[in-house]
Image: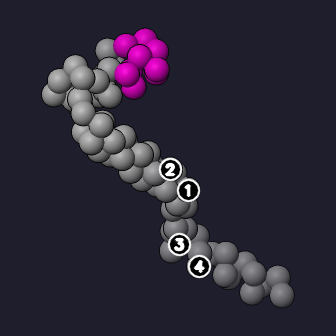
Amino acid sequence: MKNVSRTTNSCESFHSKFNSQFYSTHPNIFNFMDVLYGIQADTEIIIRRSNVRRPHKKKYTRKNTIYRQSNS
């Protein structure tokens, strides 16, 4: 139930999450920058994870090797 979005718009969702990370309505610049750096780091991790390919299963690697050897 924690992963269910309480908003209907992705922009509203980001804004809600962003605002919940501050302890006051007007944070100082250092707290603001810390939150931005945290969001940037999380985003970079998500991007890197999406670019990584899963390795082939050993079963298929072996079959592909046998297939290539039989065709040469």
Query: Label 3 vs label 1: CA separation?
Result: 24 Å
Can you name the residue that lies furthest to the left here?
A: 23
- Residue positioned 16% across, 28% down in the render: 23
Tell me whether the residue at label 3 lies in contact with that at label 1, contact meaning CB atoms closer than 8 angstroms. Answer: no
Q: Quadrant of residue 65?
A: bottom right
What residue do we see at 30% from left, 37% from top? 29
Q: CA distance from mark 4 to mark 3?
A: 5 Å
- Residue assigned mark 1: 51
Callout 4 secondary element: helix
Residue 57 coordinates in the image, percent (x, y): 51, 68
Dots 1 and 2: beta carbons under 8 Å? yes
What amino acid is at disc 1? Asn
Instruction: Report how far apart the C-alphas of labels 1 and 2 lie in the structure.
Output: 6 Å
Residue 61, horizontal then vertical, whole percent: 59, 75
Name the image quarter holding the C terminus. bottom right
For label 1, the crowd category at 10 Å Cα-Cα, with few meaning under 14, some 14 to 19 and many 20 or more, is few
* Residue at mark 4: 62
Residue ID for mark 2: 47
